[in-house]
Structures are given as structure tokens and as C-alpha cells.
Image: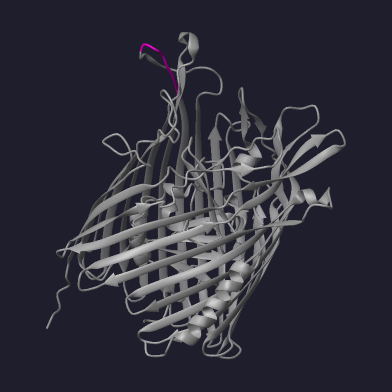
Amino acid sequence: MKFAVLAGMLILNINILFAQNDSAVVPLSEVVVTGQYKPQTVKNSVYQVRVISAEQIKQIVPAKLQDVLSTQLNIRFSQDHATGGSNINMLGLSGQNVKVLIDGVPMVGRQGFSNEININQIDVNSIERIEIIEGPMSVIYGADALAGVINIITKKRSVKPFSLSAGIQEESAGKEYGLHKGSHNQFLNVKGNLNNRWYAGAGISHTLFDGWKDTATGRELSWHKKQQIAGNGFVGYHTALLNIYYRLDGLHEVITNPANLPPGGEPAIDQDYISNRLMHQLQATYSVNQKLTLSSLLSFTHYTREVYSTLYYPNGDIRKATAPGLQSFSTLNGFTGRATAVYQPLKKLTFQPGIDINIESGDGERIKAGKHQINDYAFFLTAEYTPISRVNIKPGVRFIKNSVYKASPVIPSINVKADLLKKFTLRFAYARGFRSPSMRELYFDFFDANHNITGNPNLEAELSNSFTTSFDYSIFSKPRLAWKVSLNGFYNDVSNMIDYASFPGSQTITYMNINKYKTRGFTLLNDVVYRQLKFSIGAGYTARYNDYSESDKTIPEFEWSPEINSNISYNFPKAGLNFNIFYKYTGKLPRYIQTTSTSGPLYILAETEGYHWADFSVGKRLFNMLSLNAGIRNIFNVKNIPVNTGASGIDETPLQVATGRGFFMGLTFNFSKQPTHNR
């Protein structure tokens, strides 16, 4: 049964192959920039790049970025309904191993002192497209790119002199919707060309999620209220040889966590989690001549995270809580400086040397001995060699110097792409990945009634050996029919993995380099475009390492989990109407937990049940400037997923996934001034 799904899909591919004819869409090609020397199509990239286009994002009608990424294979999310977090998992590795970029600039984490990114703190209305590269990109992008890179490309200069878009979107939280229930989103974006060389734009969005009551009683909410304001502005200058622009992104987020009143007239302890971020970036590219192009990037992020606790009394009186551990304020400043040169001395040979500087400093009540700073300096060199017209070889190496942790001094990689025939493309990659310890793992201290956690400043970086491969077959590439099949595989071995640890006789938990970890897996993807129909179906199978197998050889070394996804879109151009269905099956996720018995340690299999997820949307163009979108989110009414252990006395907390089946509707206004042409 383990391979039944993929075998069935292979049979489906063969059946469709013989059932179709050659009579019939634009080839499946998109321009990508992540990790490239210059923008180029997905087909020509030496990396296996997955693109979520502006059209796909629009069809999903997302209220948040997670709505977009959760439809993808090899990507899963874990929810924290209390703090509003939504942490990503890719290739079986945690979000601390996923590098999230905005226009190539690394983001700062949700908690300020963690590498993990709350993906929903990114304004989905400012996104042009998303580029995903699976597998280590540590040579080019440095630490935390062990599992891969998600590069969010924002909307910038357009060919039209002026454009404006505004919209509102309303969405229920399960069955709950009203003036103070559900989710409410508004946004406004404007951009234009000031003249032939200068361009500028700005945007703002406001999202209010009023929480989800469900079965909670009293003042409590099952999912807590969240209000988010995100804004951005940019200005740029371009000529035939020079392109330079500055961008500012801002975020203000408040998550409200009310508590029930305890008996005896005691006050309830309410908490607000307040996040603020300002992210500056300045980027420039200059073409010296046909052989040499210079690029530079400067970025500075100021991030604060505050936990503000209040006492709510039965008579309605509210006071600031003063007990230890109930108030905290943390600040994180991050600087990134990057400079590269792309030099092509020969037609078949291109070099890219570069320097990368990352400086991170943090301060707060829960950080050991006050303020700390981590300086990371790197020099990297990549080359792309084309010995024959259909083969590309791209080796790379990164040299690292870090002020705090012991980093591997040299990180190598190699990527190979071969067009075996006109329709067949093979890619292979090896990379040495690494993840630096976060400031949270190094210096974080948290002591209260429920926590006793301390950081470890002696941690070393996590290291990995990773292999990825892909095989693409373009079955059809006709003007009216395109069909592409991809078979991808990955293999990750991680050493020095950082995990929680405790010592005998001590209640304190700290971080240590104690574990090794491995993931394996493969995916089969199909993308078909036939006239106005777009159809994709894929399946994946991922194995996660069971470290308890080293202690008990009777239990398996790996536990496997399947995934299936499918997207169907049909467009009626004359009617301005489109229908879209997005489906994903997230398979059962097994893992072992340790308990004790009279005979010693006992390992019990715990399985998080699989679940089906589907969204449906319909879009209708109204007149020339308005469009209406409506649909159903979470058709299968998924809420909490049980975790089964099959053992009495062991209770596992259900996995909180969503608020149940909801309905959404949005109205968007788009206006653009058409360019004037001189006769």
C-alpha cells in the first residue's frame, strides 16, 4: 500500500498519454530570479524551482499567505492558536531550516529570537509571485537554508503609467460570522511611473480576525483575536544599465488572549502579544559591460515583541499585572549586506563571487546577561559551466566566519542540469547544509510557574549532507496543450541537531547538540493546460527519522507519510468567469514517544490522523474595473485532528488545524491608466 498512490498516478499518466492527441496551451514556463545569475525561465534554471504565480494566488483568494502555501506538496504547517503563530515544515524539516526571503532579503522571526517565521505576518496582497527551491541553498543564502528557500517576490514597477487596486474580503470562522465575528480584510495598493526612469508605489492592508469561540466558555476563545496592519512603500530608478530601488515594509500585530475568571473573586490574567517590524532594503544592479554585472543589497530590520499582561477583575476593573514573568519586551535588530558580481569571461563559463554579512543583535528581559550580538561573515563563489549545449554544471563553495558558534569553515555544493532529449530534463544536486543556532537557543531564559528553560551559548551549528534529484518530461508543448510530468527525490542527513535536553535531578530544560536526523522522500507532479482548463495532480511520500530506533532495534528507523494534491481551474474569458478547486490530502503522520515500564523504556507509536482539505472559489469580472470572488474554505470541515497512541494512560493533544468550514466573499477594484504612444 505504501506505493499504491504513486503507482496509480503513473498508470493515470500512461492512460492520459495514449488518450490525448497532438491537436491542442502555452508551454509551462515562467521567469524566476531566486539563485539565478539573471532572470530566466524555470526550464533553463539549474535549480528545480516551483513557482506560485500571481494568477494562482488570485484564484485561491487568500486571506493569509498560509492559504497559498498549504496547497503545496512537501509543505505542512503547525498552528499556535494562542500566540497566532503558524510555523512551516518543509521536506520533513522544521521551519527553522527554511529560509524565508522577501525579494531576496531574509526575514526576522516571529518571536524575535527564533529562526522560525510566522508566514502569516507577510502581507499577501503585496505579493506578485512565490518561488520555492527545495533542498539546501546554504552556499548562496547562508544559514537556515537547509530545507530550502521560499522567496516572496513583491509587486513593483509595471509597464502601465499608473495603477490602483483596492479590495475588501469577508470570511467566516466556521459557522461564526458577524460584525464582531469572523475575518475582515481591507487593502489598498497604488503604483506608477513618475517618468521614463523613476517609479514608486505604496500599499496598506488591515486584517481583523475576531477569534473563534467554538466550544470555549466564558471569556475564553478557542482561537484568539488578532489584528494586523501591514504597509509598504517603494521608489526606484532604472536605465538600460542601472536599476536601484528602496523598499520599506512595516507590520503592527496585536493578538488578544482573554482568560476566564477564576473562582473566589480573583482576577483573570489576560495577555496581549504585540509585534512590530520595520524592514528597510536597498538594492542595486549595474551592468558594467556585456561580461560583467554588479549587484548589491543592504537591509536593516527592527523587530520588537512584547507580552503585555493585565488583570481583569469581576467588576470590570483592569490593571497591569506585575507578577514575575507576566511582562516582557524583546528587541531584535538585523543587518544584511550583500555584494555579488556576475562575470562571463567565456561564452560557456560564468562566475559569481560574493560577500555576505549578517549582524544580529537582541535585547530583552528573557535574554541572558542583557544584549547579545552575532556577527556572520561569508565569502562565496559559484560558477556555471556549459561543456556542451545541453549540460549545465554549477559548483559552489562558501567560506564562513562566525563570532559566536563554531561553523564549518567550508560549505560546498554542486548542481547539474542535463537536457537528455528535447523533452527530458534531469537535475541533480548535492549540498552541504548548515543551520546556525538562533539567539533564542543560545541566550534565551524563561522561568515561570510552567516553564524552566535556559539557553546554551556553547551550541554548534547543525550540518547536513543533502541530495536532490528531479526528472522532468514535457509530454506536450503545443500552442493549445501543455503537459509536464516531474519526478523528484530528496535525501537529508542532519548531524548536531539542536533539541531540548534535561539533566537527571534537574527540572531545567536547555538546548544541546544531541540528535541526528534524517528525511527521505519523493514526489510525482503533473501539470496540464488544455485551452481554458488548467489541471494539476501530484503525490508525495516523505520519511522522517525515528531516533528511538537506535535504542530499540525492533522499531523501524523511518516512518513514512503520504500527501496528495490537485488543483483544477477553468476560465470562461468572454463571460469573465472562472472556477477553481484546490485539494490536498495530508496523510497520517506517525512518530514514536517514550514512556517507562517495569522493564525499562517503552516506545509507543503515536499517529496523527490524516485529513482531507479542499477549497472552492469562483471569480467574476464586473464591468471593467470590478471583480467579485466568493467560495468555500475547508469544504471537509477540518478542525482538530486526533493523535492516537493505542495505549491507556497516554493522552496526546489533538493537532489544531483550522476553525472548520467557512465561506468568503471579496470585491476588488482595479484601475490602470493605459500608456500613451507617440506617433
Q: Is residue 366 above or below residue 2?
A: above
In the displayed structure, would residue 323 be above or below residue 604?
Answer: above
Residue that protrudes farthest toward the top in the picture: 264
Q: Residue furthest left?
A: 679
Camera-side residue: 279 or 550? Answer: 550
Q: How many marks?
A: 0
Q: Determine whether 250 is above or below 18 in the image.
A: above
Any part of residue 337 in sight: no
- Residue 677 in the figure: left or right of residue 62: left
Tell me the quarter of the picture where residue 442 sits.
Answer: top right
- Please indicate whether residue 196 sits to the left or right of residue 658 in the image: left
For the point 37% across and 81% down, the residue is 26
Q: Left or right: 499 with respect to 120?
A: right
Q: Position of residue 585 (x, y in %)?
A: 52, 58
Q: x, y percentage for residue 338?
A: 51, 61
Q: Is residue 573 left or right of residue 22?
A: left
Q: Residue placed at 80% from the left, 35% from the top?
A: 596
Specify whether residue 42 is painted magenta.
no
Q: Which of 50/402 is in front?
A: 50
Q: Is residue 623 visible?
A: yes
Q: Which quadrant holds residue 237?
A: bottom left
Bounds of the magenta span? 309-315
Which colour assignment does the render follow? one colour
Quarter of the image where the C terminus is located = bottom left
Q: Position of residue 153 (x, y in %)?
A: 41, 62
* Quadrant housing the N terminus: bottom right
Nearer to us in this view, 191 or 309: 309
